[in-house]
Amino acid sequence: MTSVQKYFLSPSMKMAALMEMDFKLLGVLTRMGIPFGFGDRTVEEVCRENGVNPDTFLLIAAVYVYADFKPTREVLQDVDLPGIVAYLRRSHSYYMEVMLPAMAGALERMVKPGDTRNLQIIKQFFAEYKEGLQQHFDYEEKQVFPFVKAALDHRKADVPLRGSADDEHHQAAREKLQDLKSLVMKYIPAQCDQQEAYKVLFYIYNLEEDFAKHTFIEDEILLPGAGFEGDNLTEREKEILVCVAKGMLNKEIADLYSISIYTVITHRKNITRKTGIKTVAGLTVYALLNNLIDLNTVE
């Protein structure tokens, strides 16, 4: 029994029944190139008809349907890496060509009743977010996907692979999206179109949630499936770990590296996820054992 079947997702189930489990799977269906109108056919039948690997489709569906889903080693050994890469690439296009233009239009209509200054401020902020997101996707295209291709070719990657948690552009883009959400929800002028503000927030929450799934698929399925060892800490994560071991607070670490507290917290979560160690004492021992700090520097 695979980890997908454990969660009651099977190639023999009806595709319509699967869609009923979570409406967000409609977006997955579209990005996999599967059209509607599949009647009472099973997942396997619909996928085969459209040239999609049913196991790959169900693996991605499990990420969306079950919050606690974690692929087993067995699943990762047999994962369809080209299929996962193809899905992630289609997601890039979906975000940049569908979701962001829809959000941009709603933003412009939201501010239109106000003055042009507000419109320019919002447009500039959104443009910076969009640029940051594109930089993250460029990173995946230039760093992550070539590594996966190299793994498929059974040769050493030509480019050094950093963990995606080390991608500062990714962090900045996520923070800007959260900032945009706060600005619209708390601080837009009263004369702004409230219905369009609702649409903007709806798009933001959907993009935020979907992008989190995108990141999970990359970090927990694609990279482990390609042989990337997830417990390798990035250079920035090692720096944060050293600070934690020295007893520094999140704000002190943020000030030291000129990053936000949110970014520090995210790095610490990544460190815990990769090492499997949750306590400061345990992380300090880890840092000592891996020669990241000297015993004399520990308080």
Image (cartoon, rainbow, N blue to C red):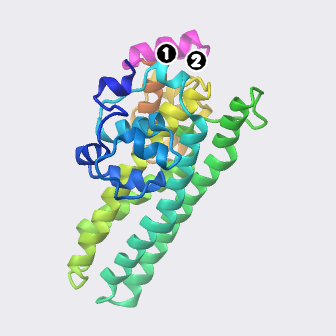
Q: Quadrant of the C terminus?
A: top left
Instruction: Evaluate whether residue 299 shows in this view.
Output: no
Image: 78 above or below 57: above
Place residue 4 in its image quadrant.
top left
Residue 155, image x and y in percent?
Answer: 78, 27
Reading the image, the residue beneath label 2 is 293
Q: Are marks 1 and 2 in contact (CB under 8 Å)?
A: yes
Image: 23 above or below 1: below
First in sequence, mark 1 or 2: give its number.
2
Q: Quadrant of the N terminus?
A: top left
Is 161 left, or right, of 193 in this rendering? right
Q: How many marks?
A: 2
Q: Residues within 10 Å of mark 1 (few under 14, many from 20)?
A: some
Q: Residues within 10 Å of mark 2 (few under 14, many from 20)?
A: many
Query: At x 62% / y 32%, what residue is drawn?
Result: 235
Instruction: Give the extent of the magenta segment.
Output: 277-299
Is 28 left, or right, of 96 in this rendering? left
Image: 166 above or below 197: above
Query: At x 66% / y 35%, what residue is drawn?
Result: 148
- 208, 12: nearer the viewer: 12
- In front of the other: label 1 or label 2? 2
- 220, 44: nearer the viewer: 44
- Helix, strand or loop under label 2: loop
The amino acid type found where label 2 is placed reads Ile
Reading the image, the residue beneath label 1 is 298
